[in-house]
């Protein structure tokens, strides 16, 4: 826990070993690892946890099959080694996913795909994910939604993840190990000294000083800017900002497989089953030179994704069918690749010891976040004279202890059995709600439920299927502050609820912070 020093004049100053700026997946992962090694950690973000790039991914835990084409064998091996480890750590928010790649004349040769899949199967050990195979689309369930041109394909395994919840779970674990987590808190006014940093943390109209022995720059697309502000110099490696956009349309297929499509321009796009009633299609790769705070999908990107889907699916989609879209800016390492799609997805940890230590995180992807964090703290801890070993490879994330406290394949392979047992214990819960809670919270659903034994004990139904008990849990344990945090990051209920629900949720949250006995006064029109 960060130490609070009142100082000689009574002003409040926080003290910590490590100040992590950036509450995306890399920052949250580093905060978790560092706190678990006994370091005093403060994690702050100017917005919500995972509000930007880390909640705007393709939702995949994968080795990166297409990276083999660019000879990034080291990155693929590293990601594949992490894939099953991550699935075991949080089987409630992650699950195996089987991908089908339809094949037709004019695409990458079949022999090349088979060779790539052979490498993909063997670059790292696997415990429970099945190997790749050839698929007869005329008889396979994945063939029915496709146009008749596609009669054969290939299948392989990777994983799916609720990316925004993965960030939150890492922050929760960090907090439970002593870290202070500050959302909607901007860090600035950095001063570097020989053995410590000072910075100002600003939240709303309040500010406080923090003194940290080490500064971690995990600001994602803002990492270059933060390094410049903190030290007066840009990082040694430049970042290439690339916008990736996704669209969500009504469900295009009924089975539980995903698709990986080859486009004539050489790009790869995924079509994933999403939130039961939808299909997620993405992503694009567009060079980005604007403000990452205001990134949105462009019209040409929407058309591109629709046209690509229409090359494969019988059911045609149009921009007017898009029910939701999102965009994120990926901070990729500049490597002089000819196109954004070919730019490396590997990461670099930039160490700066010209004074108190500074670590800047450049690049990276969700699948390798845990390894990145481990390597980061392997450097930070000795720099601060702390000698504690790495630990996260054999640890569960909050809610992942379905069958004990040690990660195992059982949580992945027997998750449905765990859900069924949960539903039997709480047969008064509507089945759809019980399943959603099991998927979102795992064993932490017991904290959410408390002593409730009937639907009425959950409190007001603030929005359809969203009860006061869940809202209180999110506010008290997951740093949710508003409807956007809840509907689009802690959950994807925003896709399912009718218009106007967000206002009702915000009104309910505001009422929780209103002093007892006070009366709300309407603002003048």
Image (spheres, rainbow, N blue to C red):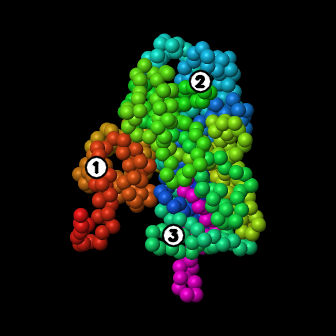
**Residue 158 % position (x, y):** 57, 32
State whether residue 94 appears in this view: no
Q: Position of residue 221 (x, y in %)?
A: 59, 52
Residue position marked by numbered label 2 in the rendering: 264
Dot 2 surroundings within 10 Å: few (below 14), some, or many (20 or more)?
few
Q: Is residue 188 left or right of residue 420?
A: right
In the rendered structure, does residue 123 fall within the stretch colored magenta? no
Q: Secondary structure at mark 2?
A: loop
Element under disc 1: loop
Q: Quadrant of the C terminus?
A: bottom left
Labelled disc at residue 500: 1
Which residue matches tag 3?
A: 202
Residue lying at the far bottom in this picture: please name it: 9
- Of pointers 1 and 2, the one earlier in the residue sequence: 2
Disc 3, SS = strand
Residue sitting at x 47%, y 35%: 302
In space, the residues marked 2 and 3 are separated at their CA atoms by 48 Å
Q: Picture coordinates of residue 192 (x, y %)?
A: 69, 71
Q: Give the mark nearer the N terminus: 2 vs 3.
A: 3
* Numbered disc total: 3
What is the span of residues highlighted in magenta in the rendered image?
1-24
**Distance from Cα at disc 1 to Cα at disc 2:** 42 Å
Residue 278: percent from the left, percent from the top?
Answer: 40, 33
């Amino acid at each position: 826990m960060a130490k609070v020093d009142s100082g000689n004049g009574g002003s409040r100053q926080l003290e910590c070993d490590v100040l992590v700026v950036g509450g995306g997946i890399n920052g949250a992962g580093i905060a978790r690892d560092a706190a678990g090694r006994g370091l005093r950690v403060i994690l702050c973000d100017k917005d919500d946890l995972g509000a930007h790039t880390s909640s705007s991914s393709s939702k995949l835990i994968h080795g990166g099959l297409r990276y083999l084409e660019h000879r990034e064998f080291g990155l693929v091996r590293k990601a594949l080694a992490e894939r099953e480890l991550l699935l075991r750590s949080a089987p409630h928010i992650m699950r195996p996913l089987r991908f089908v790649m339809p094949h037709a004349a004019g695409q990458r040769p079949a022999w090349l795909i088979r060779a790539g899949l052979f490498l993909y199967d063997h670059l790292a050990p696997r415990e429970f994910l099945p190997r790749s195979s050839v698929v007869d689309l005329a008889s396979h369930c994945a063939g029915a939604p496709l146009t008749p041109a596609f009669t054969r394909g290939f299948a392989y395994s990777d994983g799916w993840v609720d990316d925004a919840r993965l960030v939150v779970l890492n922050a929760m674990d960090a907090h439970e190990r002593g870290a202070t987590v500050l959302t909607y808190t901007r860090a600035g006014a950095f001063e570097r000294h020989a053995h410590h940093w000072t910075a100002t943390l600003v939240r709303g109209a309040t500010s406080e000083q923090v003194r940290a022995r080490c500064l971690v720059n995990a600001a994602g697309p803002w990492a270059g800017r933060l390094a410049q502000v903190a030290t007066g110099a840009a990082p040694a490696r430049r970042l290439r900002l690339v916008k990736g956009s996704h669209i969500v349309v009504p469900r295009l297929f009924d089975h539980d497989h995903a698709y990986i499509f080859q486009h004539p321009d050489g790009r790869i796009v995924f079509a994933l089953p999403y939130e039961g009633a939808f299909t997620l299609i993405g992503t694009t790769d567009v060079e980005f030179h604007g403000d990452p705070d205001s990134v949105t999908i462009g019209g040409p990107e929407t058309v591109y994704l629709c046209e690509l889907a229409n090359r494969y699916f019988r059911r045609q989609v149009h921009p007017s069918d898009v029910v939701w879209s999102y965009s994120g800016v990926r901070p990729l390492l500049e490597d002089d690749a000819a196109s954004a799609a070919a730019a490396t997805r590997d990461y670099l940890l930039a160490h700066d010891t010209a004074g108190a230590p500074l670590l800047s995180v450049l690049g990276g992807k969700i699948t390798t976040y845990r390894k990145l964090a481990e390597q980061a703290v392997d450097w930070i801890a000795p720099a601060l004279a702390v000698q504690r070993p790495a630990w996260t490879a054999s640890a569960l994330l909050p809610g992942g202890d379905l069958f004990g406290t040690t990660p195992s394949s059982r949580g992945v392979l027997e998750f449905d059995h765990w859900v069924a047992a949960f539903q039997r214990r709480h047969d008064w819960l509507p089945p759809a709600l019980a399943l959603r809670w099991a998927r979102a919270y795992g064993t932490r659903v017991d904290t959410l439920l408390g002593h409730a034994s009937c639907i009425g004990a959950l409190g007001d139904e603030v929005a359809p299927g969203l009860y006061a008990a869940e809202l209180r849990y999110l506010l008290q344990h997951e740093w949710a502050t508003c409807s956007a945090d809840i509907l689009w990051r802690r959950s994807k209920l925003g896709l399912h609820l009718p218009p106007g629900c967000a206002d009702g949720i915000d009104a309910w949250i505001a009422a929780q912070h209103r002093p007892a006995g006070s009366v709300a006064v309407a603002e003048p029109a």
